[in-house]
Image (spheres, rainbow, N blue to C red):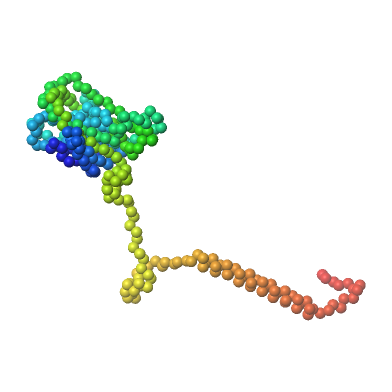
Amino acid sequence: MPEVLGFRISVEMEGRELPEYKEEVDYSSGIPVATCWIPSEAGKTFQVNVRPPPVRSSHWSFVVSLDGMCAVMRNTLLFRDAPNDRLSLAEEVIGNGLSRTFKFSNIQLTDDDSMLNSRAADKIGEIGLSLSSVTGCIPIFNPRYSNLQAAGRMHEKSKKGLAHCVQPGEVRQTGQLSWYQTFGQQHEATILFKYRNLDILVAQGIAPRHALPEPNRQPSPPPRAPAAQRNASAGPSNPRKRKSSPIRIEIDIDEEIRLIEEEKELEARLAAIRAKKRAKTVKVAVKSEARSNFVPGEVIDLT
């Protein structure tokens, strides 16, 4: 994000500062409004980082909005002479000694028509930061806490192309905090981070295609050289010591089936020839058999 009034604002997601796309600063209203697009990932926590200018002429106050809802957060007051070179706006204060983080979450689509023209849905997909100069502040002892609820739902006919929303994260114990009420507050600038799934940013032409992670591709094996080339490159063989190598046998299935069928046909023809030959032998034997001298009424002993 370009510097605004000397402040450098960014969004960090689980230790990684997010890239920013299509940065713009609009001065038409008299108060600068800086806008950019960032990639979000469901299930990952995030925080807003503020790097102030080293020299400041006033105190500063910051208000964070998540999907259009303002959150009471730690580190939102910067004194003029404080040595801070960076403020991390990462936790919503929900009670005395209790705070919680924020994370991106998958949005749920609904067919509930009451959500079709919901104003709350118009702000889903935005992280806002309001910067105000402050004349002074006084300590208070009855602070106001917040308890934001995730928007999380959007009508299925919405055209915003959203996949994510902001959802509260884990609750943790914190120490006692000092609370102040500011006065002489003057709104000076607004920062808007519009978050979307990276695939959506690329599809809409907001982020370049090379921002997408490379797919996991298995390297293809090198081409196998012809047998003659492999034998030629192997060099002369050593007759005394020869390294054994596996023999690769390639079988043509179609050729094998054809040979089997041909073998069966030959066997059938051979069997037919043999049967025909046996039949001729029997006929010849019958013709050459001597005539019997059998006389009617003669008894022949067959025992």
For the residue pair 282 and 297, the one nearer the viewer reads as 282
Residue at the limit of the structure toward the right, as seen here: 297
Residue at 20% x, 22% y is 143
Q: Position of residue 243 (x, y in %)?
A: 34, 69
Q: Is residue 83 left or right of residue 204?
A: left
**From the image, which quarter does the C terminus lie in?**
bottom right
Residue 187 visible? The answer is yes
Q: Position of residue 39 (x, y in %)?
A: 27, 41
**From the image, which quarter does the N terminus lie in?**
top left
Q: Position of residue 146 (x, y in %)?
A: 25, 25
Residue 169 sits in which quadrant?
top left
Residue 286 sits in which quadrant?
bottom right
- Vertical comparison of 150 with 288: above or below: above
How many marks overall? 0
Residue at the limit of the structure toward the top, as seen here: 142
Q: Is residue 18 left or right of residue 223?
A: left
- Vertical comparison of 128 with 204: above or below: above
Q: Position of residue 155 (x, y in %)?
A: 37, 33
For the residue pair 5 and 165, the one nearer the viewer reads as 5
Residue at 19% x, 31% y is 130
- Vertical comparison of 40 with 130: above or below: below
Residue 222 sits in which quadrant?
bottom left
Residue at 39% x, 66% y is 246
Residue at the limit of the structure toward the front, as seen here: 28
Residue 14 visible? The answer is no
